[in-house]
């Protein structure tokens, strides 16, 4: 039913796409998580019929007749309560899975999008924020440098290289410095911790959101003609939300732009509902963004933000990837 209702409808995506590697898990991870979950809700089978080494096969054999009826017999409140506790330590358990989660174009799920495996065929409005990486630099090999309140004075070229080299497998350590120099190219002073940190934030945001979005959109636009909407080829519109807002959601103090989720309050009109909390320019921005989203849902093209109010019904340009 969902495919019939929404297959050709406009799709609005914020900070990511349905195949974001960050939110994917391997099948074995999810299978093991499922086995642990059913054990917590007492839906395991008898001792003689317990899981085998091939967990996927065991789940398939027992799903319809044993596991599903047991889960259906439990109160929804119990299932949801156990899920909340379980997700705290196994956050990827209930997200999509893929055999590989590579960022790059040869990944199996990007190939699946290009070959038409993604059944949606409508237009897409998608965007990211200027400092998407600000909340994600606190995890990974350089997490020891993270502070919410200030940029570490030790985040310099030599210190970062030493940390990355110690983290890398021994057979790859000789590659760390040349790769680092490529990624840091353009930083005026590699010993300036602020400049180096801002570059790192940018790289993390690109890796987590921007690059996966590019591969998803490129694959979506390159699909075979047989998988596109007949009336016209799909159009993609891309925005970049940049301002350092007055009420950030979870933004470190050193951020110089919008962090992850900061745009949501504007798209859903919070500055218009609570005008006393926001300056006039942010109320105007919220109105513009809300209008843009509603126009897109009705098939128009960025009428409000790009000041084309007189041509809101102008035809879309096919295969157009833009930044506004």
Image (cartoon, grey):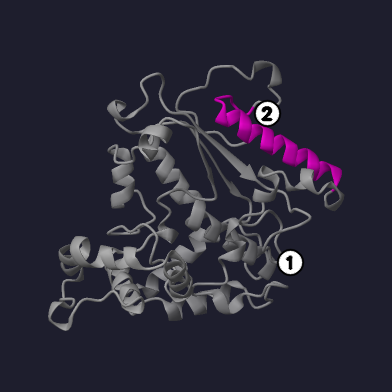
Label 2's element? loop
Say left or right for 67 vs 151.
left
The Cα–Cα distance between marks 1 and 2, rounded to whole angstroms, is: 31 Å
Q: Residue at horizontal 35%, vertical 28%?
A: 228
Q: Is residue 288 magenta?
A: yes
Q: Residue at horizontal 39%, vertical 60%?
A: 95
Q: Quadrant of residue 295?
A: top right
Q: Which of the two residues, 137 or 299, is positioned nearer the viewer here?
A: 299
Label placed on residue 306: 2
Q: Give the farthest residue toward the left.
A: 48
- Residue 157 lies, in percent from the top left, at 58, 72
Say left or right for 43 vs 244.
left
Question: Magenta part of the protein: which range?
Answer: 279-302
Q: Residue at horizontal 18%, vertical 66%?
A: 62
State the count of labels. Answer: 2
Q: Main secondary structure of the magenta part?
A: helix
Q: Quadrant of residue 222?
A: top left
* Residue position for label 1: 253
């Amino acid at each position: 039913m969902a495919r019939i209702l929404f297959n050709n409808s406009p799709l609005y995506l914020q900070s990511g796409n349905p195949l974001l590697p960050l939110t994917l898990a391997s099948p074995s991870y999810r299978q093991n998580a499922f086995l642990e979950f059913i054990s917590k809700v007492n839906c395991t089978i008898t001792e003689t019929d317990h899981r085998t080494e091939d967990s996927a096969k065991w789940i398939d054999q027992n799903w319809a007749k044993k596991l599903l009826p047991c889960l259906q017999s439990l109160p929804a409140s119990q299932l949801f309560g156990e899920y909340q506790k379980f997700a705290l330590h196994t956050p990827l358990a209930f997200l999509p899975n893929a055999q590989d989660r590579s960022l790059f174009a040869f990944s199996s799920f990007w190939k699946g999008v290009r070959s038409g495996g993604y059944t949606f065929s409508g237009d897409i409005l998608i965007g990211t924020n200027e400092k998407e990486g600000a909340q994600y630099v606190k995890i990974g090999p350089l997490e020891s440098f993270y502070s919410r309140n200030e940029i570490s004075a030790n985040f310099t070229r030599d210190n970062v290289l030493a940390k990355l080299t110690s983290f890398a497998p021994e057979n790859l350590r000789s590659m760390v410095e040349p790769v680092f120099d490529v990624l840091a190219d353009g930083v005026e002073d590699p010993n300036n911790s602020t400049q180096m940190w801002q570059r790192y934030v940018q790289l993390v945001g690109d890796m987590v959101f921007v690059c996966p979005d590019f591969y998803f959109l490129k694959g979506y636009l390159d699909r075979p003609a047989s998988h596109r909407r007949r009336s016209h080829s799909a159009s993609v519109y891309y925005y970049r939300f940049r301002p350092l807002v007055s009420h950030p959601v979870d933004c470190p103090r050193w951020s110089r732009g919008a962090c992850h989720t900061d745009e949501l309050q504007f798209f859903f009109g919070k500055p218009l509902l609570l005008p006393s909390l926001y300056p006039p320019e942010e109320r105007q921005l919220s109105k513009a963004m809300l209008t843009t989203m509603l126009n897109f849902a009705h098939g128009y093209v960025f009428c409000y933000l790009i000041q084309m109010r007189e041509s809101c019904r102008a035809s879309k340009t096919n295969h157009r990837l833009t930044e506004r």
